[in-house]
Amino acid sequence: MAGNRTFTMIKPDAFEAGNSGAILKMIEEAGFKIVAMKATRLTPELAGKFYEVHKERPFYKDLCAYMSSGPIIAAILEKDNAVEDFRNLIGATNPANAAEGTIRKIFAKSIEANAVHGSDSDENAAIEGNFYFSQLERVL
Ligand code: IDP
Ligand code: MG
C-alpha cells in the first residue's frame, strides 16, 4: 500500500526569490497537509549527508554548495499516495522537461536550482523527514 507522507524542501533559489508562499499555496491547494515545517539552512557537510546517494555523480559537489548557499524550508506533507502525487506536482528534475503547471516548470531556474525537493519513495520520505525533524517536532 502506498504511504501517506512525503518530505519536501523549498530550495535556496525559490526561498531567495520570495516564492516560498506561492509554492506552499500550490502544495496546499493540491491537497497536501503540512504536518511539520521549518525554515533552516544546511551546512555543506549536512547537504553532503542528505544527498549522500548522489556522491558519485558529477554534480554532487556543486549540489552540496548550492543547497547550503542560503535558507530553505523543510516540511513533512501528508496526503493519500503522497510520494507519487507530490512528484507529479513538482514535475521533472530538469525544468525544461517539466510539464506545464508543475512547480518546477513555474519556479525552477535550472536543473540544479530547481525550486523544490520531493522524496522518491516511502522509505526515503521517512529517512528525510527524520533527518530534519526530531520526534518532538513530528507530533502531528
Ligand atoms: P530529483 O530531485 O528530481 O529527485 P535527483 O536525480 O534525485 O533529482 O537529483 C537530486 C538533485 O540534484 C536535483 O533535484 C537537482 O537539484 C540536482 N541535479 C540532478 N541532476 C543534475 C544535473 O545533471 N546537473 C546539476 N544538478 C543536478
Ligand atoms: Mg531524488
Image: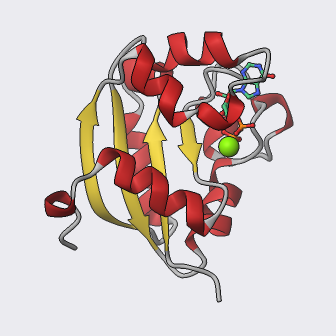
Relative to 100, residue 50 above or below: above
Q: Name which quarter of the figure residue 97 lies in.
A: top right
Q: Nearer the viewer, residue 63 or 20?
A: 63
**1, above or below 34, in the image:** below
The image shows residue 61 at horizontal and vertical percentages of 63, 11
Q: Is residue 96 above or below residue 27?
A: above
Do we see residue 17 in this rendering? no
Residue at (44%, 68%) from the top-left corner?
A: 32
Q: Quadrant of the N terminus?
A: bottom right
Between 65 and 78, the one nearer to me in the picture: 65
The quadrant of the picture occupied by the C terminus is bottom left
**What residue is rendered at 18% in x and 58% in y?**
137
**Residue 4 image offset from top left, x and y in percent:** 50, 78
Is residue 89 something one can see in this rendering? yes
In this image, 95 relative to 115: left or right? right
The residue lying toward the viewer, choosing from 121 and 113, is 121
From the viewer's perspective, tell me whether residue 7 is left or right of residue 51. left
Ligand 1: quadrant of the figure? top right
x then y, percent, for residue 104: 65, 37
Toward which corner of the image does residue 44 lie, by quadrant? top left
Seen from this angle, which residue lies furthest bottom? 1
Q: Position of residue 80 (x, y in %)?
A: 54, 82
Which of the two residues, 53 or 138, is positioned nearer the viewer here? 53
Residue pushed farthest left? 136
Q: Quadrant of residue 72?
A: top left
Q: Which residue is drawn at the image coordinates 41% and 26% (left, top)? A: 46
